[in-house]
Image (tube, rainbow, N blue to C red):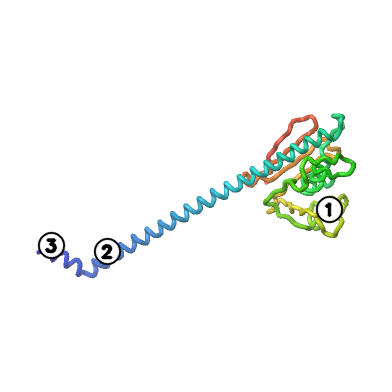
Amino acid sequence: MDQFKESYQQYNNPVNRNSKSTKKKSIDIVMIVVFFLGVALIASMVYFGYSKKSKSLADEQRLHDISQVVKALDQFYMNSSSLPGNRYYPIAICSSELNEVDYEYTLKKALAGSVDNLSSHSYIFAGDFPRDRDGNYTDFLVGDSPEHRCLDNIPIEKDFVSYPDGSQRCKFDLGSNKSCYLYTSSANGDFYRIAFFARSSKKFIVIEKKRNEPLKISFHKE
């Protein structure tokens, strides 16, 4: 009887009831907050993990693209002359510095076999010539560097068309548009450099080949 009375008094006491209710609500709120924090943490881990994997896969594709071009460059070099001392790589017409136009125009023409007075053999078909899938492409050639250095060397058949074959130009700069393949060579073609930007490591990977020397690979911070 006393136990029942004590229980009744506790139940009938509004202070005790409110105290228990308040504690229960506080626990519920904490559990909800912890739950949502956990969900947010898991979501961010999944997102960053996917983003990192996506960048890594894209860089693997870039490396595959450039390796195919390097093989084609070796074939072009070997077929450029029957005399070893006269062999050369495609000669850049824009700049001795790495740039996208010599990759997309000069190199593409040479490896696709569409350069006058050269072999018409295609080492890479023009339609299959690799380009960075994350690049920012435009139909316009004029108005940006480094095109001012090589407009005189590119026959533009229509006003403001990027290249004579109608293909788009990758707008390269060291700011937000680094995703372009780049190429240059010496004036006599005895060496070349080709490069791409690896997003996963945030570094430029530069491949250089000189006549009678092994291939060199270097890494440069953005």
Who comes first in sequence, dot 2 or dot 1?
Answer: 2
Identify the residue position indicated by label 1 in the image: 164
Which image quadrant for residue 73?
top right
Give neighbour class at mark 1: few <14, some 14-19, many 20+ (Cα, 10 Å).
Answer: few
Q: Residues under labels 1 and 3: Cα distance?
A: 98 Å
Q: Which residue is the site of mark 2? A: 20
In the picture, measured across the screen, residue 92 lies left or right of residue 134, that is right
Q: Which residue is mark 3?
A: 3
What is the three-letter code of the residue carrying label 3?
A: Gln
Per the image, label 1 sits on a secondary structure element best described as loop
Cα distance, mark 2 to mark 1? 81 Å
Front one among 58 and 36:
58
Question: Disc 3 to disc 2, how far (Cα)?
Answer: 20 Å
Q: Mark 3 vs mark 2: which is more N-terminal? A: 3
Q: Nearer the viewer, mark 2 or mark 1?
A: 1
Q: What amino acid type should be assigned to the residue bearing mark 2?
A: Lys
What amino acid is found at the position of numbered circle 1 in the picture? Pro
The residue located at (68%, 50%) in the rendering is 133
Is there CB contact under 8 Å for labels 3 and 2?
no
94 up-or-down from 140: above or below: above
